[in-house]
Amino acid sequence: MNKALFEDVALKTKVTPRTVEEIFKVVCGFTAKTIKEGNFETVMIPFFGKFKAPAKRVQNRFNKRNHIHEIIRSNS
């Protein structure tokens, strides 16, 4: 992935590059899960900033959900 970046951060924080990579994966997974489960709300990660789903993706997701509900209602 970002081997050079992991190595640089590892040197600065005095941990192994593998540990940096594992932390990175956990934080990314947590962020993605939180955004999806929380109605695509913004997630704040200390020292890294705010992360949010792109507005267009959120709108497409809600449009698709509404379209499915309309199909179900029309078939009932």
Image (cartoon, rainbow, N blue to C red):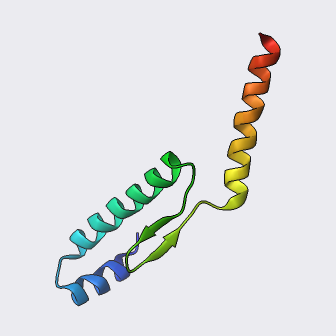
Q: Is residue 57 above or below residue 19?
A: above
Q: Position of residue 43 (x, y in %)?
A: 48, 64
Farthest top residue in view: 76
Q: Which residue is painted at 65% across and 62% down in the image?
A: 54
Quadrant of the rendered structure where residue 15 is?
A: bottom left
Looking at the image, residue 38 sits to the left or right of residue 56; the answer is: left
Q: Position of residue 36 (x, y in %)?
A: 52, 49
Q: Which residue is painted at 60% across and 60% down in the image?
A: 53
Q: Which residue is painted at 77% across and 18% down in the image?
A: 73
Q: Is residue 65 above or below residue 52?
A: above
Q: Is residue 37 above or below residue 16?
A: above
Which quarter of the rendering shows the C terminus?
top right
Residue 11 versus residue 27: which sits nearer the camera?
A: 27
Which quarter of the rendering shows the N terminus?
bottom left
Q: Which residue is painted at 73% across and 38% down in the image?
A: 64
Q: Position of residue 11 (x, y in %)?
A: 22, 88
Looking at the image, residue 75 sits to the left or right of residue 46; the answer is: right
Q: Is residue 57 above or below residue 66?
A: below
Farthest right residue in view: 74
Looking at the image, residue 74 sits to the left or right of residue 21; the answer is: right
Query: In the rendered picture of this protein, how many numbered marks are placed on residues?
Result: 0
Q: Position of residue 24 (x, y in %)?
A: 34, 67
